[in-house]
Image (tube, helix red, strand yellow):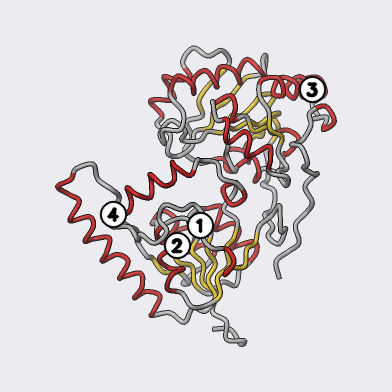
Amino acid sequence: MVEDGTFVAALPRSLLHLRFLVENRPSTQLVLFRDAGLAPAIEQHFPGRSLYLGREQRPSRNPLHLLRIRAENRAYYHSVAQAFASQPINRLILFLEGEPLERFIISRFAGEIELWEDGISHYIDLTSPLWYAARGLIQGVSGFYAGQITQRRADRSRMTVRDRFERRDLVLAPPKLGSRRAGGLLIGSPLVEDGIASPAVFRRAVQTVAAGIAPLELKYLPHPRENLGRLDEALAGIPRTSLIRSSAGLLPHLAEHSYLLYAAANSTALLDLCEFDRSLFVPSLFGLGRMDRELRAWEANPVMVGGMEALAKLAARLQATGQPDPASIEHPEGSEEPKKPTQLA
């Protein structure tokens, strides 16, 4: 407890969330977490200030397991409530608003809640309401906390919302990049694994990106949830295209060497890189019309959005000069050049 009586806890769900905490609220008294893989990084930055919550049992396709899973999930939420009751938390930082665990906590927490940015999904809805509702119904049947489970957004009116690009009261330092390679990097998302894009559409999209930046080589950096066997098959035979098999992740990879150009269907990594005039969202190439429209309509979006023509234009400019020409490819309609956020007090 600090002198003014405030006890701040946070519930990060990813390394990106943890970076936000380290750079904006390093004095956080307690870091709650549910994924054991985050434990080493949390201990590094917040030694002795963490509490493991565990997580729900995932839905099962076997109906014989359903009753057991429902009972275990009810017990899980009871244990979370006990964990909160044992701590003097009166200010809570969350990063997700539509997940059952966060909804459960919000429904019972009487203190001040801050909702911090979670990347692109904080600003816009990339999936349809029906997709989210179907996912929620499956979770509800499996005993996840069911309050507003089919809705994407929480009631933000009772929260203090903080982010980088609209309210500009969070900061995230640009990563350190290694020497620049004369090639392009396509940053992956689990679109096929999540049933958002078919394998055939995915392969055609990668082929289009490779053709659009020719004669540059294209590297594909997979998302941790993408299946490497599927990617090997999808990328086979595509000219000048290869898969990065390192498990180190995006930032460690870029610390060794950066790229002339970056593309992604919808990855938040394009925001985090701060290489805005070298980057392009290309959801339309993956058949993701809704994502394309939402990204174009987001007025604070600092990253360009386009298809084959925009990709080819950017690649040609970078190959000719090594530098982007912001005037040659328009930013999304109504957007401005990103301004530096103010440091959170």
Q: Which marked residue is nearer to the observer: mark 2 or mark 4?
A: 2
Sequence-first tag of 1 and 2: 1
Q: Front-most of 338 and 139?
A: 139
Circle 3 residue: 317
The residue at the point 58 percent across, 84 percent down is: 2
Circle 1 residue: 96
Sequence-first tag of 3 and 2: 2
Under circle 3, the secondary element is helix
Query: Could you tell me if the residues under marks 1 and 2 are in contact, i.e. CB atoms within 8 Å?
Result: yes
Characterize the local packing of mark 3: few (<14), some (14-19) or many (20 or more) Cα atoms within 10 angstroms.
some
Characterize the local packing of mark 2: few (<14), some (14-19) or many (20 or more) Cα atoms within 10 angstroms.
some
The residue at the point 36 percent across, 73 percent down is: 81
Q: Position of residue 175 (x, y in %)?
A: 66, 47
Give the alpha-carbon distance from disc 1 to disc 4, as whole Å: 19 Å
- Kindly give the residue lying farthest to the right in the view shown: 327
Circle 4 residue: 57
Give the alpha-carbon distance from disc 1 to disc 3, as whole Å: 38 Å
Give the alpha-carbon distance from disc 2 to disc 4, as whole Å: 16 Å
Q: Which marked residue is nearer to the observer: mark 4 or mark 3?
A: 4
Q: Which marked residue is nearer to the observer: mark 1 or mark 3?
A: 1
Characterize the local packing of mark 1: few (<14), some (14-19) or many (20 or more) Cα atoms within 10 angstroms.
many
Query: In the image, which disc is placed on residue 292?
Result: none
Characterize the local packing of mark 4: few (<14), some (14-19) or many (20 or more) Cα atoms within 10 angstroms.
some
Q: Which marked residue is nearer to the observer: mark 3 or mark 2?
A: 2
Give the alpha-carbon distance from disc 3 to disc 2, as whole Å: 45 Å
Q: Amino acid at mark 3?
A: Arg
Sequence-first tag of 4 and 3: 4
Q: Amino acid at mark 1?
A: Leu
Q: Please, is residue 90 above or below residue 276 in the view?
A: below
Circle 2 residue: 102
